[in-house]
Image (cartoon, rainbow, N blue to C red):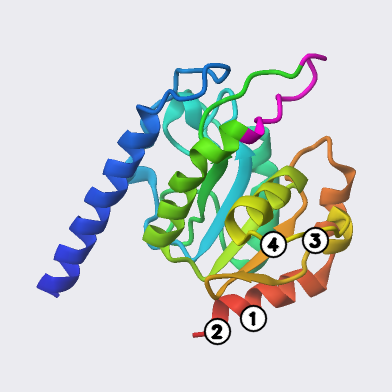
Amino acid sequence: MKGEKLNKITENEKMLELFNEIKNCHKCPAMYPEKALRKIDQTNLTADVFIVSQALARDTLRESGINFYKLDGSIGNTGKQLDKFLSLFDRTINPASAKCVYNTEIAQCYPGKNKTGKGDRKPSKQEMENCIHFLIKEINLINPKLILLMGKSSRDSFYKYIIKKENNSGFSEQVGNIDYYNKIPVIPIQHASGANPKYSGMLEDESIIKNIKRLLNEQ
């Protein structure tokens, strides 16, 4: 019991050190420099589901320090939609729950709006390369049972920079397919956006949910 407590403290210290490193990184001049320190007490370090998004959003974690939650404590739209999917296999974005997932990004800063003003700017190749070492450290510390890549940009970047594998498949055709990174199953999923009509269809795909449940129940 004492050894387990010591290990947990050590893991907390390592993750807090990483969170501070992320907060204090300002390598990319085009990225927004302001970002809150992620709250370690609102992070499930024993999460078995690890979700990867494209980049930090403007008004949730960047301001609140808590994934998917705004500064006023309300849940952002992506978080609300994602929780519908997670609930199908007994997981949640709620940090108070032992079933809370761990979420992070390919790029750890907010990139700003794109030139059209609709949607966020996609991080550049250099910006993503500057952040990949953070993501690798997070995966190693959490050591999840399953990695979910939310959206095409997350899928493309993870394959290119983490798995280092050519991926010429169309995104929708690959959603739900299982690959591996260091023996951890990796599954692309539709982005949990209200503007993505294919997301609601994924909620009704029983084969994806069945595979996820099977992977999570495997030892």
Please name which of the two marks, 1 or 3, marks the residue nearer to the observer: 3
Quick one: label 4, few (<14), some, or many (20+) residues within 10 Å?
few
Quick one: label 3, few (<14), some, or many (20+) residues within 10 Å?
many
Question: Quick check: can you spot residue 73?
Answer: no
Q: Which quarter of the figure has residue 10?
A: bottom left
Q: Which quarter of the figure has residue 80?
A: top right
Q: Are marks 1 and 2 in contact (CB under 8 Å)?
A: yes
Q: Looking at the image, which residue sits at the far left?
A: 2
Q: Secondary structure at mark 3?
A: loop
The residue that label 1 is drawn on is 214
Earlier in the chain: of badge 3 and badge 4, it is 4
Whole-number angstrom distance, CA of label 1 to CA of label 4: 25 Å
Q: Which residues are magenta?
A: 115-125
Left or right position of 186 against 34: right
Whole-number angstrom distance, CA of label 1 to CA of label 3: 17 Å
Question: Quick check: can you spot residue 117?
Answer: yes
Please name which of the two marks, 4 or 2, marks the residue nearer to the observer: 4
The residue that label 4 is drawn on is 165
